[in-house]
């Protein structure tokens, strides 16, 4: 009887100890390099729909009242489906990168998508860096399909100043 009680108490103590151990940390993905990102294609197919991307870097030079948090530059990202097809269900836009020369920038929060013309959605990322000129700036958008498979899509960025 004592042996069963001791075994029972040992099991309870062991289970209590296991319950207090920290959960395994999810494995963090290694951040992509500029070379990795530049290998992204300029068109990808998700489901039966071929997608392309382009961006517009907006340099906001309008006067403001009060302090400014971050930069006032932002990028409008246009994802366009070939032949104005509807985007497949479950598509998510997970990461946005901009590259100019040796400078790699990863966007924080992605706003959108918002609809526009058929087959086109727009996203917005704020606090973009002060790139020297958008002509040599590349945009990389990471897309997750409904099945969770991730793909990268690369496009050009044009520049516009708002005064």
Image: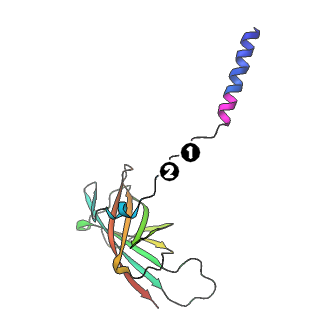
Residue, disc 2: 28
Q: Is residue 72 above or below residue 102?
A: below
Q: How far apart are marks 1 and 2 (CA)?
A: 8 Å
Q: Give the residue drawn at x 28%, y 54%.
A: 47
- Is the Cβ of the residue at disc 1 closer than 8 Å to that at disc 2? yes
Q: Is residue 149 above or below residue 153?
A: above
Q: Give the range drawn in magenta.
A: 15-25
| Residue at the far right in the pictured view | 2
Q: Where is residue 159 in the image (x, y as percent from the top left)?
A: 38, 82
Say if the magenta span includes residue 18: yes
- Say if residue 91 shows up in the picture: no
- Quadrant that contains the N terminus: top right
Q: Give the residue drawn at x 39%, y 60%.
A: 142
- Label 1 secondary element: loop
Q: Where is residue 117 in the image (x, y as percent from the top left)?
A: 32, 73
| Residue at the far left in the pictured view | 83
Q: Residues within 10 Å of mark 2 (few under 14, many from 20)?
A: few
Residue, disc 1: 25
How many marks the image carries: the answer is: 2
Q: Is residue 114 above or below residue 71?
A: above
Say if the magenta span includes residue 163: no
> Of residues 80 and 101, which is closer to you in this image?
101
Quadrant for residue 84, please give it.
bottom left
Quadrant for residue 75, please give it.
bottom left
Instruction: Name the side, left or right, on which 65 lies relative to 125.
Output: right
> Of residues 136 and 140, which is closer to you in this image?
136
């Amino acid at each position: 009887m004592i042996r069963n009680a001791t075994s029972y108490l040992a099991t309870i103590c062991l289970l209590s100890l296991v319950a207090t151990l920290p959960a395994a940390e999810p494995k963090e993905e290694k951040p992509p390099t500029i070379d990795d990102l530049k290998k992204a294609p300029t068109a990808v197919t998700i489901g039966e729909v071929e997608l392309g991307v382009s961006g517009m870097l907006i340099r906001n030079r309008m006067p403001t009242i009060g302090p400014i948090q971050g930069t006032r530059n932002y990028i409008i990202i246009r994802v366009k489906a070939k032949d104005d097809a509807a985007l497949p269900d479950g598509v998510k836009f997970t990461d946005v990168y901009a590259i100019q020369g040796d400078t790699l920038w990863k966007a924080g929060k992605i706003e959108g998508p918002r609809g526009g013309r058929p087959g086109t959605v727009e996203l917005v990322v704020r606090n973009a860096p002060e790139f020297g000129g958008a002509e040599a700036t590349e945009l990389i958008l990471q897309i997750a399909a409904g099945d969770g498979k991730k793909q990268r899509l690369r496009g050009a960025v044009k520049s516009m100043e708002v005064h």
